[in-house]
């Protein structure tokens, strides 16, 4: 089952069976219940996750900007099977940019520790290159989506229609 879940994950796209076996060796399966907070915004992180079953909400807290606000943390994305999260703090060793909370009962995650992933990448450069390339592609997609959301919010606040909403 673990190998099947790895094959379904975008981050492991284009890996051969032997490479997937090597990834499986550094994965830890975690069965999680709905509402469990996996990590919190502005805290350090040392692992990334792949969703094997269920879903996870990604939340941001406007109060983290230092503004006094009564706005509660907001869900900005709901991730599902095959998707990766937590990779940004893993790669750059910075603080978490959001909070991750389990959204469904019986969610199964595959966790990979930073030191294990980096050791594997150093021991097999081809594997390391492909995994890191796939992580970068995933991050670029997320960044483009975030940019689009920011633009839409800016246009909404100014009241100026955009070319998508004009009739």
Image (cartoon, grey):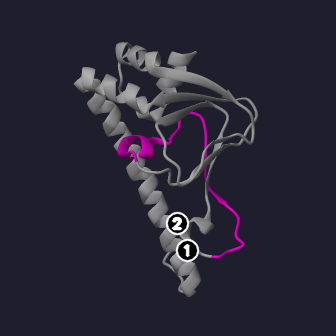
Q: Residue at x 67, y 75 (%)?
A: 69
In the rendered image, the quadrant that contains the C terminus is bottom right
In the displayed orientation, state which residue is furthest to the left: 125
Question: In this rendering, would 95 be left or right of 131?
Answer: right
Stretch of the chain drawn in magenta? 68-93
Examine the rendered structure and indicate whether residue 3 appears above or below residue 83: above
Residue 129 relative to residue 91: left or right: left
Q: What residue occupies the far bottom of the structure in this picture?
A: 159
Horizontal and vertical percent position of residue 109: 60, 30
Give how far across and how far down residue 6 sits, in percent.
49, 24
The 10 Å Cα crowd at callout 2, few under 14, some 14 to 19, many 20 or more, is: few
Quadrant for the N terminus, please. top right
Q: Position of residue 110 (x, y in %)?
A: 55, 27
Up-down relation of residue 43 to residue 62 (above or below): above
Taking the magenta stretch, the answer to whether it contains residue 98 is no
Mark sitting on residue 130 = none
Q: Residue at x 33, y 29 (%)?
A: 118
* Residue 87 or residue 6, whichever sits in front: 87
* Circle 1: element type: helix
Position above or below: 102 against 60: above
Q: Which residue is mark 2?
A: 149
Q: Residues within 10 Å of mark 1 (few under 14, many from 20)?
A: few
Circle 2: element type: helix
Quadrant in which residue 138 is drawn: top left
Q: Where, by quadrant of the figure, is residue 61 drawn?
A: bottom right
Q: Are marks 1 and 2 in contact (CB under 8 Å)?
A: yes
Q: Give how far apart the Cα atoms at labels 1 and 2 are.
A: 6 Å
What residue did someone put label 1 on?
153
């Amino acid at each position: 089952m673990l190998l099947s879940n790895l094959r379904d994950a975008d981050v492991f796209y284009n890996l051969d069976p032997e490479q997937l076996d090597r990834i499986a060796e550094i994965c830890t399966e975690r069965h999680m219940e709905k509402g469990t907070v996996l990590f919190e915004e502005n805290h350090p992180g040392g692992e990334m996750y792949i969703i094997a079953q269920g879903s996870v909400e990604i939340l941001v807290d406007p109060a983290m900007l230092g503004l006094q606000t009564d706005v509660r943390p907001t869900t900005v994305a709901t991730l599902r099977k095959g998707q990766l999260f937590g990779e940004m703090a893993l790669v750059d060793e910075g603080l978490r940019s959001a909070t991750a909370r389990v959204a469904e009962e019986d969610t199964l995650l595959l966790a990979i520790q930073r030191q294990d992933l980096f050791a594997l990448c150093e021991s097999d450069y081809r594997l390391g290159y492909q995994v890191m390339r796939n992580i970068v592609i995933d991050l670029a997609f997320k960044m483009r989506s975030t940019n689009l959301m920011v633009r839409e919010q800016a246009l909404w606040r100014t009241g100026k229609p955009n070319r998508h909403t004009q009739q």
